[in-house]
Image (cartoon, grey):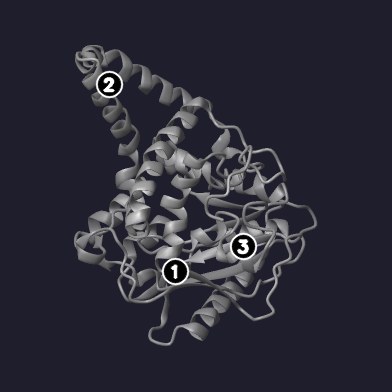
Amino acid sequence: RRFAVIADGNDGSVPLRKLTLFSKVNLFLLHGFFSIIQMILHPLGLAVPVGTAFLASMFGCMMFVPPLVCWTVLCATDLMLPGTYQAVMDVKAYWISTILVWYLFTLATDKAPRTPVGANHRRPTNIMDAAAHNFYFWNVIDYFPIECVPWADDATLPPDRQYVFAIHPHGIFCWGLFMFAAAGTPFDKRFPGLAGKKLVGLVATVLFTIPVIREFFLEWPYIDASRRVASDALNSGLSLYLIPGGEEEVVVTTHGQDSTVLMKRKGFIRLALSYGADLVPVWGVGTTDSFRTYPAVFGFRKFVQKRFGIAIANYHGRWFTPLPYKDKPVRILIGKPIPTPQPKVRGEKPDPKLVDEYHAKYVAALKELHDAHVKDRPLKIL
């Protein structure tokens, strides 16, 4: 199942969005590196923890993979053709400037982050892609393992309806995202027809400006979190999943405490009301227990987050590494959908009083969902 390969990376529903040559090259280098690591570590039984630790620190590690691959290939070539390394270094000013211009041109012209239709998971087309996906996706689900817990035994989510899944908390790393990103996940098995077909995630605009990180999100069903792009997705008949607390929730995350930044977060409520989509609360039990956190330089980190939209976290996992603690299983609770009234005109701005009403309903539903499954701590709404 994990190594399933299909011809064009698509499930046949709609054509996949087009990627630029810059993105394709970066993904090729990523897949080449991670497929080798997966094939080496899997027989040793180390692929699952190493893959999980890598993804937990992906923003610090992933950008260095393509340069590392290129450097390794260059060094290997130099062993066979002495002088190659020096020859390449002699003209580094030219190829570095070329890559920089290529990258800036890609940022200016690439429409993929703002294209919701076809933003599905790009399924593996060869063994290299499949092994790479195993390394930084399926290994994480197997590590805890991550479970999907619906609100009732007979719960259903008809795929012909639209939903806005709001995931809490972000934590240091939001494990709940894995439920919705691809076909074959525990969520997809429980509620088929949405993941990998009619469900896209929203991520901060800044992440689509970081080399390699942007390619990682473009490979999976993620789009720019701007209001216009999110509206385009809903207007196209797609459903959304997002993290209302965003990067602020990363900064305020405290080990062993359940809290979520929600009191002033009403954008996702407006989106749902504008298109008549059901609101679905989602809570990740065990997310804040995955890492030890420290409050050092909290004021500075909060300033950076507010000013630049960048979250700096003080944390560590097992043995002071990025490997998450697994003292408690990670259970992703899927709450009962909250129906919203159909607007007279799809996409119209909802009345502020209606927004406040459904925001209050949503907060109450989230608290009820949390309290029904978590008995050792209260939920703090920030």
Using the rendered view, name the quadrant where residue 359 is placed.
bottom right
Q: Secondary structure at mark 2?
A: helix
The residue at which mark 3 appears reads as: 188
Residue 171, image x and y in percent?
38, 64
Measure the alpha-carbon separation of dots 2 and 1. 41 Å
* Residue at point 61%, 46% (across, down): 120
Q: Nearer the viewer, residue 19 or 375?
A: 19
Query: SS of the residue at dot 3?
Result: helix
- Residue at the spot 55% in from the left edge and 43% down from the top edge: 124
Q: CA distance from mark 1 to mark 3?
A: 15 Å
Q: Amino acid at mark 2?
A: Thr
Q: Give the residue number, with chain letter if any, for mark 1.
A: 145
Query: Residue, x 50% and y 59% (percent of image)?
Result: 178
From what the image shows, is residue 108 above or below residue 259? above
Task: Compare residues 88 and 114 and report the one nearer the observer.
Answer: 88
Q: Residues within 10 Å of mark 3 (few under 14, many from 20)?
A: some
Q: Position of residue 282 (x, y in %)?
A: 54, 69
In percent of width and height, residue 295 lies at 22, 65
Label 2 – label 3 distance at C-alpha: 45 Å
Amino acid marked by disc 1: Pro
Label 2 sits on residue:
77
How many marks are shown on the rendered structure? Answer: 3
Circles 1 and 3: CB distance less than 8 Å?
no
User: Of marks 2 and 1, which one's residue comes earlier in the chain?
Assistant: 2
Quarter where residue 269 is shown: bottom right
Give the mark nearest the N terminus, 1 or 3. Answer: 1
Give the farthest residue toward the front.
Answer: 43
Q: Amino acid at mark 3?
A: Asp
Please tell me how crowded label 1 is: few (under 14), some (14-19), or many (20+) other residues with Cα within 10 Å.
few
Secondary element at image label 1: loop
